[in-house]
Amino acid sequence: MHNPPYFTDDTIVFGLLMLLIGLVFYTSSLEGALWKKFYSIVPALLLCYLLPAIFSSLHFIAPEWTELNEAGEEIKKSSQVYFVSSRYLLPASLVLMTISIDLKALLNLGFKSIIIFLSGTVGIILGGPIAILIVSIVSPETVGGNDFNAVWRGLSTLAGSWIGGGANQAAMLEIFKYNQEKYGAMVLVDIVVANVGMAALLYGIGKKEAINKWLKADNSSIQDLQDKVSTYQESVKRNPTLTDYMVILAIAFGSVGIAHWGSQALASFFSKNFEIVNDPLSFASTFGGTFFWMITIATLLGILLSLTKLKTYEGAGASKIGSVFIYILVASIGMKMDLGSVLENPGLIVVGIIWMLIHFIIIFAVAKLIKAPYFFIAVGSQANVGGAASAPVVAAAFHPSLASVGVILAIFGYVVGTYGAIACAFLMEKVAP
């Protein structure tokens, strides 16, 4: 939590983010050799993420801050740009990018995606205790502590977040009763390391051909899905009219309205009628959250609409508009990253980085073993660490039609998140000094 940034008005912040995105797209379209070389090294999507992070680090913008009221008391303030992006634009993009999906080809992706996702989960479960063991050799005080100040208790919340999501993270805080005065440091590690991990995955997308060659991966099922969608896009392609755009936006935000309405009703129904949903120890606690139902309903609506004549609106640019929303979401995620905060808790940041490296080593090793493509690695990792807000972003970076794969895997993460985090916490307790 910091003093107010230079820009606190979300209208200005949103305008700045849009200018940055526009600048990236404009420069990436230039024919000059210098720009072509630059974007062959730094993907445009990664830059849309990093530029807001730089502006946030320089304190021009900020996700949250504190101000003094007239009585001299500190009050918390926060930007709503990410909230709006994740609650309105994310479900809208899921519908628009799923509307052209070939359901049969999607199902043909097979079990490799599940295997890679689960190997990423195992990487998180094992990565925590291994990171503690390594750091304890050099700095035992960094990963030590007694009673409710024990660092392993705080790290259990990272395990919950990195396997599942916010609900699982909150469950770990409730279960292991970590000292909440120190909890802010764990949130910092979560944000910094998870965002660095996402940046690495986005960078890898630009090198996916070389990575797939090293993995000796069979990319045929993914390529088949992309080809079918691309062929369909060409077959229905037309010069869009104002009516087309209005219908596309009606489909998108009408679906968002249904998703929000349905999520509130379902979360309330499960919370009131099933006691297990209110138990943070249970995987069923996920069903009491509106975000889970929102992204689930939006994805299902997109799949259902892909079976109707509304699918033809892909020819008028439905997935392109969905991609616009995704890039805005990427920029809003980037502004949550304060690069300077890495220096505030260097010891814990090192623990988090080692933990994330072990996660990557295991997921890459399994992918190499079963010859799974980089797409499954990137999406499987992000479905664990980033959850439903960012897994579709990474999936859509390969092809807009693949966004739903990220959502489906992220839902698995919500289900196994609590139990996986408990297993990780048990192992961390055993090895902690």
Image (cartoon, rainbow, N blue to C red):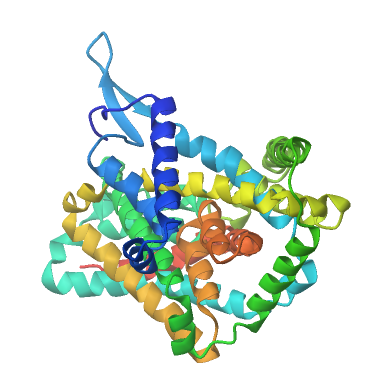
Lateral position of residue 142 relative to residue 40, left or right? left
Q: Where is residue 152 in the image (x, y as percent from the top left)?
A: 30, 60
Query: In front: 240, or 374?
Result: 240
Is the residue 312 above or below the residue 59 in the image?
A: below
Q: Where is residue 412 in the image (x, y as percent from the top left)?
A: 61, 63
Q: Which residue lies furthest to the left in this view?
A: 138
Q: Which residue is drawn at 56% across and 54% down?
A: 388
Please indicate, yes or no, whether residue 126 appears anywhere in the rendered image.
no
Query: In front: 283, or 148?
Result: 283
Q: Residue at x 12, y 66 (%)?
A: 139
Q: Position of residue 47 (x, y in %)?
A: 37, 55
State which quadrant residue 129 falls in: bottom left
Lateral position of residue 217 relative to residue 308, left or right? left
Q: Where is residue 159 in the image (x, y as percent from the top left)?
A: 41, 61
Q: Which residue lies furthest to the top in this view?
A: 70
For the C terminus, the quadrant is: bottom left
Query: In front: 100, or 84?
Result: 100
Q: Residue at x 43, y 70 (%)?
A: 206
State how many labels appear. 0
Please indicate, yes or no, whether residue 332 appears anywhere in the rendered image.
yes
Query: In front: 258, or 29?
Result: 29
Q: Which residue is drawn at 53% across and 40% down?
A: 85
Is the residue 157 above or below the residue 63 in the image?
A: below
Lateral position of residue 219 relative to residue 241, left or right? left
State which quadrant residue 5 falls in: top left
For the N terminus, the quadrant is: top left
